[in-house]
Image: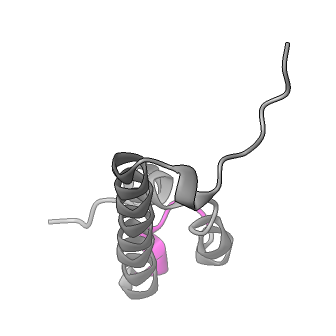
Amino acid sequence: MPKRSKKRWSQLSPTTRAVIVAGGIAEVIVTSVALRDLVRRPAALVRGPKLLWAPLLFVQPVGSPLYLIAGRRAAAA
């Protein structure tokens, strides 16, 4: 099987470039939302220690969505 070389940015199609840029922007937005929520949310409403979640938010692409889905407790009504 022939060895494939990595493509350079200039070799990617405009569509592929747009998808990569959009994905990067989405990651930045989701991470920012999760970090803001973690800072503002009381520790009692976070599943697990906040100091554990903080670095995990930056494990891309799963850290921030995982926190937003599973790391938060619902506030009592």
Q: Quadrant of residue 60?
A: bottom right
Vertical placement of residue 12 versus 31, above or below? above
On the image, the x and y values in percent for residue 35 come to 45, 78
Vertical placement of residue 50 versus 21, above or below? below
On the image, the x and y values in percent for residue 16 come to 41, 47
Vertical placement of residue 46 versus 50, above or below? above
Residue 45: in magenta span: yes
Considering every residue shown, the one lying at the far left of the view is 77
Q: Quadrant of the N terminus?
A: top right
Q: Quadrant of the C terminus?
A: bottom left
Q: Which residues are magenta?
A: 42-48
Residue 6: in magenta span: no
- On screen, residue 43 versus residue 74, left or right, reads right
On the image, the x and y values in percent for residue 29 come to 35, 72
On the image, the x and y values in percent for residue 66 come to 49, 51
Considering every residue shown, the one lying at the far bottom of the view is 40
User: Which residue is depicted at the point 62% across and 70% down?
Assistant: 49
Camera-side residue: 74 or 15? 15
User: Which residue is depicted at the point 36% across and 53% down?
Assistant: 14
Q: Quadrant of residue 33?
A: bottom left
Camera-side residue: 66 or 4? 4
Q: Quadrant of residue 58?
A: bottom right
The number of discs equals 0
- On screen, residue 61 versus residue 30, left or right, reads right
Camera-side residue: 58 or 45? 58
Q: Is residue 62 at least partly visible in the picture?
A: no
